[in-house]
Image (cartoon, grey):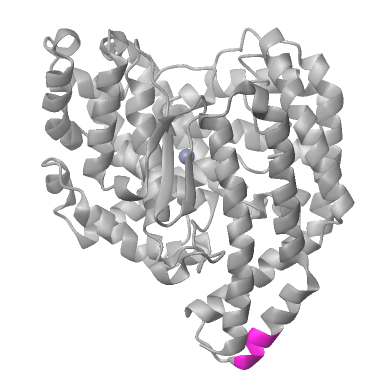
Amino acid sequence: MGEKYQALVHHLMDIRNVNRAEALLGWDQQVNMPPGGSKARASQMATLARIGHEMLTDEQTDLMLKEAHLENPDAPYDSDEASMIRVVREDYRENTCIPSDLIAEHAEATGLGHNIWKEARVKNDFASFVPILKRILDLTRRMADYIGYPDHPYDALLGQYERGMTSKEVKRLFDEHKPPLVNLIARINADDDRVSDDILRRDYAIDKQEQICVDIATALGYDFNRGRIDVATHPFAMGLAQGDVRITTRYNKNFLSPALFGTMHEAGHAMYEQGVSPALEGTPLSRGTSLGVHESQSRMWENMVGRSKGFWGWAFPKLQAMFPESLSDVSLETFYRAINKVGQSYIRVESDEATYNLHIMLRFELELEMVAGNIPVENLPKEWNERFEAFFGIVPPTDTLGVLQDIHWSNGLIGYFPTYALGNMLAAQYYKRALEDHPQIPAEIAQGKFDTLLKWLNVNIHQHGRKFTSAEITQRITGESIKSSEYMKYLDNKYTEIYGL
Ligand code: ZN
């Protein structure tokens, strides 16, 4: 490792320190901060964001990248050095191509937008959200133009979350995924009285839920010496350092699922960040490579492991012992079916594994048209409801349960939704490959042993951090690109059995 490269890494670590300090303020804002602190906190975070952005976009960064490259121009593609230079060069380009006054305008509009959306959602008043959404959309389109795109402005936006992915590819994946998915859901709906989740809505004392969540996260391999769990309204995982990756969850006394599966989900995200190679710690590569790959980790632990019968063969007796008054009359089979119930829900975040990707497809269709300027913002509720009926056979009774339900647009996160569905597809592809390499994994899970799977994920995905793109990781692991058929197979197998299709 040469001198110039080391100088570059020091510079990048300084930037990462600023970013992580900002992230810690954000964690505190969502977990501990009294409401009175919100104004000052927003200002503190904005200052750190500006400093971090200035440091990254300084010409010095560009110069250091060039010097580090010249020092060792033949470093192998997958070396830490070449990867660092390649990835940060693109970070630099992405961050310098948008004029700073446009970034500031966008930050201001989305800051306002968030509060306006919150109120509009509570009051079921889409009209009050229209002017600011128009402004956010307009600013977002301008940003897409600066970032640049080969085909559709949406590509520029999507690429911020899933580098290298295009709207054309997403459309191809969704077109292939939708017909068999719709068919499966129709077959399930015809038999939907076969499964009830009433038993999950009994009495579950919160202190005991906390205990079981810690026990399960620990068993999966989330390292509490390098993490902690707290309560937040909107659960998230946050990496502040490799030795400090935190998760949050939420508890509902009369519904067991949010805490249980939310914790496994966030632990999946956190184990990804805890597993990045120590050699990359403190650099811009020391985190997950894309939102899609990140979501593949959370969904794998939450669903493929956490909603499997094998897993509950091990965990259910523990859960029963914790909640004898609510679960002593419940069989493992009844519990397993309850946690896998497919239902018609208006709300994406409450939807089950089978219908989840349909919610995403609806948003993707709309966003493409919105970004292209084909749908006037005023018409979004109508467009939403028509599509919702075509997708799910029901019409949301209010905009609160429809077009206003998600936080993303108000925060300027347009182009973000597809990554959730990509994560589900990738999870199925990776899990299949892990099982081919280690056929004993399901039997181990049924005994409460998860280290073979976690180690496989560490070696094949986690350790690389951001060195490889999502497409590169998938190619390295499976020899293929992303596809929907493995996820479809997984769903078909699971629900055929549960619903006796
Ligand atoms: Zn997630």
Residue drawn at (61%, 21%) of the image: 388
Judging depth in this view, the residue of 179 and 89 nearest the camera is 89
Residue 68 painted magenta? yes
**Residue 379, x across and y down, in percent:** 80, 21
Q: In the displayed structure, would residue 72 be above or below residue 85?
A: below
Range covered by the magenta-colored residues = 67-71
x, y percent for residue 91: 67, 64
Where is the C terminus found, in terms of image quarters? top left
The image quadrant that residue 447 belongs to is: top left
Instruction: Decide if residue 139 is in sight here.
Output: yes
User: Which residue is at a point 78% across and 58% down the rendered structure image?
Assistant: 147
Query: Is residue 165 shown in magenta?
Result: no
> Whole-percent x and y of residue 444?
13, 47
The one nearer the camera, 228 or 363, is: 228
Q: Quadrant of residue 308?
A: top left
Q: Residue at x 82, y 16 (%)?
A: 128
For the point 63% across and 56% down, the residue is 18
Count numbered badges in the picture: 0
Quarter location, residue 209: top left
Q: Position of residue 202 (x, y in %)?
A: 28, 8
Closer to the camera in the image, 253 or 201: 253
**Is residue 152 depicted above or below 468 in this figure?**
above
Q: 271 or 178: which is nearer to us?
A: 271
